[in-house]
Image: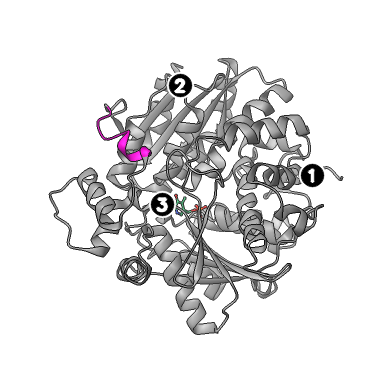
Amino acid sequence: MKDVFYSSTRGGGEQVKASKAVLMGLAPDGGLFVPDHIPAFDKSLEELSAMNYQDLAYEVMKLLLTDYTEEELRFCINSAYDKKFDCEEIVPLTEAGGAWFMELYHGKTIAFKDMALSILPYLMTTAAKKNDMKNEIVILTATSGDTGKAALAGFADVKGTRIIVFYPKHGVSPIQEKQMVTQKGDNTCVIGIEGNFDDAQTGVKKLFTDKELASEMDSKGFVFSSANSINIGRLIPQIVYYVYAYTRLMAGGRIAKGETINVTVPTGNFGNILAAYYAKQMGLPIGKLICASNSNKVLFDFFASGSYDRNRDFILTSSPSMDILISSNLERLIYHIAGDDAAADAAYMKDLSEKGRYEITAAMREKLSDFAGGYASEEETSAAIRKLYEDTGYVIDTHTAVAAHVYNEYKKNTGDDAVCVIASTASPFKFTRAVLGALENVDDNADDFALADRLAQKAGLEIPEAVTSIRQAAVLHDKVVDKTEMEAAVRAFLNI
Ligand SMILES: *Cc1c(COP(=O)(O)O)cnc(C)c1O
């Protein structure tokens, strides 16, 4: 097997092995690590169909994390995908309304971020050992709501690490916020910022690429890394569940071997759908990658016009984890469709940071034919929840509803009725007010926990442990800073 090496999308720095890329998170020039080639599966779809989640995860991840030994990788996988998940399949599939919902929310924090953030701490601490890293790893994370809690849950009390999470103080759901501010663990720090998610993400990227700060950190025994989806250690575990969904459908006789399926993904930072793109490159028979946006439809416009333009108002929606105007992982796709051309990518990213926009070439646009884009307004999102519930009794969250709407429109407009897997990215109980509000009139004065009770009663569902356990929990983090004060907040927590 040929080793896979990783280098920056912007061409700076050297090629590194997978474990080094996981440790570093972001390349030194601010680019994202990308593989020098995408390996093909070395097992047949039949063989993969016979495997459970953990064994399948090994078969997929070994191809990209080539410097981890089998023992190391199996340890990471088995430590991550265990009883923390509330069902043995890890990722169950539910058929409803003419599509298959791939439920990625059965982990500890009931959002799909758990799929990667349950394993990232193990991949990272294993990488630290392999690379003889002595410094304490400081995970710096910007969150639109779900990454923060999933990263906190993953890294809390992990030896040799600390974690700092920045979230937009007025841009997450009450349950998301309560999940984060009640986080235990001496190595955890949660800070609200007066700004939106893009401000948080831009601030974090700035801290990452500050060379002076890095050398000061090093002299005090610290090093930054990232738990955001810019880290390949998050991206690679996300490839697994697309393969798993496909092989489950195959094993259950729902599709023939090799039959092409479509996938629809509710998209924000472009990490989840990029994992599906990589799965396709590795040989999974995926036809269209349908990219679903909410009213922050910068990606829809990009697929429609070839122009990426973040110069527009940032809209707060009922699907806050997708309220993003700078989709970081799109940079990886840009690099690939430019023909793995780092200079071209660097020029586009320079335009993005200086002018807020860039336009790709006609030749690059042709390579986007794998993708279809769509978006859902707030009303359409709400209607999608209501219609699916009324037709089938199945309840989906707001993010998943964006995808369901976009998929139904896609099918109507194109006539493409290939079997479709929709990434179901959060439990409806994480966004209770909006979900229940789609089904009935909601009392403005009722708190989100009371609404959770009502949703459970109405839909005949059990409230997940992730919600019941924070109901009475004490708030342990209450710091709020301006977006210009992020560095000071980091220094204060690290005492430097
Ligand atoms: C993070 C998130 C998304 C967006 O995923 P990306 O990988 O950022 O595109 C969608 N839905 C939910 C619930 C999320 O938490």
Q: Is residue 229 above or below residue 379?
A: above
Does residue 291 lie above or below 482 as drawn? below
Q: Residue at x 44, y 57 (%)?
A: 325
Q: CA distance from mark 2 to mark 3?
A: 25 Å
Q: Are marks 2 and 3 in contact (CB under 8 Å)?
A: no
Give the residue at mark 1: 4
SS state under label 1: loop
How much space separates mark 1 and mark 3, taking CA atoms?
Answer: 31 Å
Q: CA distance from mark 1 to mark 2?
A: 33 Å
Q: Dot 3, crowdedness within 10 Å: few (<14), some or many (≥20)?
A: many
Q: Which residues are magenta?
A: 465-473
Q: Amino acid at mark 1?
A: Val
Tell me where residue 273 sits by quadrant.
bottom right
- Disc on the earlier residue, 1 or 2: 1
Q: Residues within 10 Å of mark 2 (few under 14, many from 20)?
A: some
Q: Is residue 470 magenta?
A: yes
User: What residue is rendered at 55% in x and 45% in y?
Assistant: 90
Query: Pointer 1: residues within 10 angstroms few (<14), some, or many (20+)?
Result: many
309 horizontally vs 385: left or right: right
| Residue 11, x across and y down, in percent | 72, 47
The residue labelled by disc 3 is 321
- Front residue (pair 418, 184): 418
Q: Residue furthest right?
A: 1
- Residue 425 % position (x, y): 46, 53
Residue tagged 2: 187
Residue type of the residue flagged with mark 3: Ser
Q: Is residue 189 above or below residue 287?
A: above
Question: Which one is in front, 389 or 177?
Answer: 389
Q: Residue at x 63, y 40 (%)?
A: 233
